[in-house]
Amino acid sequence: MSALTLKGPYWVTVRQHRRVLWAVPALLAVGLVVMVALSVWSAYPTYDEMHRPVMTPGYDLLRGFMQSATKSLVFFPALVGAFVAGPLVARELESGTWRLALTQSTTAKGWLGAKVAVAATVAVLASLALVGIYRLGWLRVSDTYGLRWGDLGAYESSGTVLVAYCLLGVALGALIGQLVRRTLVAMAVTGVLTGLVLLILRALRWSFLSVETVTRSFPGDPESLLPPSALRMDAGLLTTTGERLSQYFCIPQARATGACRPDADVASLYADFHPASHYWPTQLIETSILLAAAAAVLCAAFRLVHKRHP
């Protein structure tokens, strides 16, 4: 974002935080180079002495890098929100330098609007780039443990919800920065609230769409009913009355012979799951919820600045 094409409070905001604005594309470029290099390296197979294909060191490095990236990207929205709450808003309110903007034919709402617009633009562009870079490597390892489409971290990092969480972080930062008016405290509170929203939606997201259920006659292993790409929600045993029991209700030795405990009439196996086709609908539903929440919080932030500084 060039400060030469901006005017008024937008130019001031970009000028004040130009180091951060330059650091963002630089870090994205480094991440892209690393991801491309690891993806290319992992694409070349190696063979053992029997000429059988084996995992390459590049694949192992790519998977390790993806695991680290998955854990890191989950905290990106909280980092965005903390930056908006602290350096962008609370620090100027704490030091009183925001009053200088009001002497330059700028209203309080215009001052806050410039902060939010710059932060939101950078957050959206950066998060979209991060999702693209992440998916570049993730598509090669998305069938491995901890990196499947429904796993915690991989789900948030590979779709539109990351962008929506960042926008919510911007909105929370704009509101909390005004309410707290202390840089470090505002950063901490915003980061915690952004993380709390993430935890709440993690607990709720797989109830947005109904699970699919498959059954099969007993005996057997309920886990074998799940399709390869499915997100497991529940699995177990069904009695003749329809009661659900734990998959460990029958001891393994008895289950292998077709017998079970005498106090239950086990008739079949069941498994509840979300198919891979639920990935994008769930992403879009969660994204819509987050954007609505961000709009509500942002409205509250502008009402607050107008009330305090009409």
Image (spheres, rainbow, N blue to C red):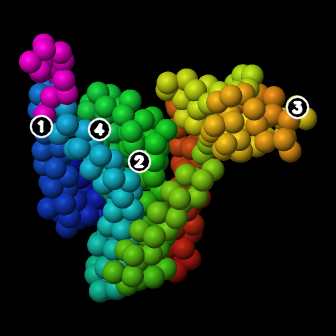
- Report the Cα–Cα distance between label 3 and label 2: 39 Å
- Report the Cα–Cα distance between label 1 and label 2: 22 Å
Which label's residue is closer to the chain start, 3 or 1? 1
Which label's residue is closer to the chain start, 4 or 1? 1
Q: Is residue 52 magenta?
A: yes
Name which residue lies at 32% across and 28% down: 139
Which label's residue is closer to the chain start, 3 or 2? 2
Q: Let me know if residue 148 appears in the view.
A: yes
Name the image quarter holding residue 92.
bottom left
In this figure, which residue is indicated by the disc labeled 2? 153
Callout 2 secondary element: loop
Q: Is residue 80 magenta?
A: no
Q: Which mark is residue 240?
A: 3
Nearer to the camera, 52 or 310: 52
- Report the Cα–Cα distance between label 4 and label 2: 11 Å
Which label's residue is closer to the chain start, 1 or 2? 1
Name which residue lies at 11% across and 20% down: 48
Of the residues tagged 3 and 2, which is closer to the observer? 3
**In the rendered structure, which amino acid carries the disc numbered 3?**
Thr
Q: Position of residue 35 (x, y in %)?
A: 18, 36
Q: Which mark is residue 141?
A: none
The stretch in magenta equals 43-57
Name which residue lies at 71% across and 41% down: 250
In this figure, which residue is indicated by the disc labeled 1? 33
Q: Is residue 174 above or below residue 249?
A: below
- Report the Cα–Cα distance between label 3 and label 4: 47 Å
In this figure, which residue is indicated by the disc labeled 4? 134
